[in-house]
Image (cartoon, rainbow, N blue to C red):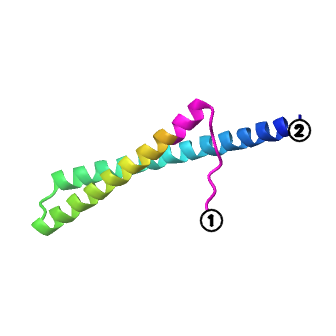
Amino acid sequence: MRQNQAESRRQNVAKRSMTKEAKQLAGLIAGLRKSLDGIHKERASTKLTGAEMGMLDERRNNLLLTIAALDDRLSAVQGLIDLGRPHVIRVH
């Protein structure tokens, strides 16, 4: 009986932890998308040199890659929560 309670407690802690992570990821992704919109506006609204345009393109590409990676992570976390298989991720 105690083993079941301990396992249930671990599952609840893991679910809370992963739900918190999902919310943080969603907020981070939203902020990065805002930055991406800012880059698009800056690129379209001003006269830029080729070097400045290249720099903005590189920032945009880096943001797109970061957003894609975070989207993948968010999807994985949400999938584990939906499957009822949350786990605590230990970072050393």
Q: Position of residue 51 (x, y in %)?
A: 14, 69
- Residue position marked by numbered label 2 in the rendering: 2
Q: How many marks?
A: 2
- Residue lying at 26% horizontally and 55% vertically, measured from the top left: 61
CA distance separating discs 2 and 1: 29 Å
Task: Choose top left, top right, bottom left or bottom right for residue 30.
Answer: top left
Task: Identify the amino acid type marked 1.
Answer: His
Task: Choose top left, top right, bottom left or bottom right for residue 55.
Answer: bottom left
User: Against 24, is 62 above or below?
Assistant: below
Give neighbour class at mark 1: few <14, some 14-19, many 20+ (Cα, 10 Å).
few
- Residue lying at 57% horizontally and 30% vertically, measured from the top left: 82
- Residue lying at 53% horizontally and 41% vertically, measured from the top left: 77
Q: Quadrant of the C terminus?
A: bottom right
**Relative to the observer, which residue lies in front, 47 or 57?**
57
Tell me where the magenta segment starts and ends, as one range.
Answer: 77-92
Task: Identify the amino acid type marked 2.
Answer: Arg
- Residue position marked by numbered label 1 in the rendering: 92
Q: Is residue 83 magenta?
A: yes
